[in-house]
Amino acid sequence: MRSEPWYHPVENEVTLLKLDDLDHPMKRVYQLSKVLEEDSKRVALTQALTLDAARPMMGLKGTYGLFGTAQCWDSIHQSRMPLKFVSGVILRTSFAGQDTPGLPDKAELRLRDGSVVDVGIYINDDEDVSLFKPGRRVRVVYALDELKKQPAAEWGVSYVTTALEMAVSLAEVASRPGFMERWFSKLFAYRRRTPS
């Protein structure tokens, strides 16, 4: 069952990242809903690819509603669509070369379990990129929307990961990692990637 193609803004917007229960103040710097309000072409193209039967291996499957529709947003807010929450402390930021030159667009985070992951930096206001500094906490939530092309490797479900919201703390929550901590972090990350 598919929704009518069109973008439906989130009414009485419900946010997914709860920021009021934290010991340190955070600022919500990104909401996909705000981006889609301004980019109807992105919504239309995504929906068209989903509905295009001539391209059975390309685009979203539409399991939880067409991208950007009321049904899709309801699936997200009711947790019918799988969501992935990531929270960690920034070790460093970098520029991957895809956006405005010189502005960081990627952050390396240390998670609670000690692992290190890279996340994209998503912002609605360019000035907020200055908030992404080592020692600050980042929280992000992603939607895992099924792709038409199935199955994924090892017979799992193939998803596209779309950032829905991102927040960053307004002050340092952890001391900056020293040289040795960064070196060990890279060494262990390298060892995990290389076969024994």
Image: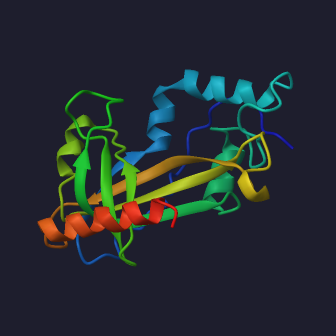
Q: Locate residue 23, reporting x and y percent.
A: 25, 78
Q: Residue at x 34, y 39 (%)?
A: 124
Horizontal and vertical percent for residue 118? 38, 54
Residue for point 40% across, 78% down: 113
Q: Where is residue 74 drawn, in percent x and y?
A: 67, 53
Q: Residue at x 71, y 61 (%)?
A: 80
Classify residue 136 as left or right of residue 77: left
Viewer-closest of 180 and 11: 180
Q: Is residue 109 above or below residue 1?
A: below
**Is 65 left, or right, of 32 in this rendering?**
right
Q: Is residue 148 left or right of residue 46?
A: right
Task: Find the residue positioned furthest to the front.
Answer: 196
Left or right, 143 with respect to 52, comes to: left
Q: Is residue 74 above or below residue 136?
A: above
Q: Quadrant of residue 186?
A: bottom left
The residue lying at 87 percent from left, 44 percent from top is 1
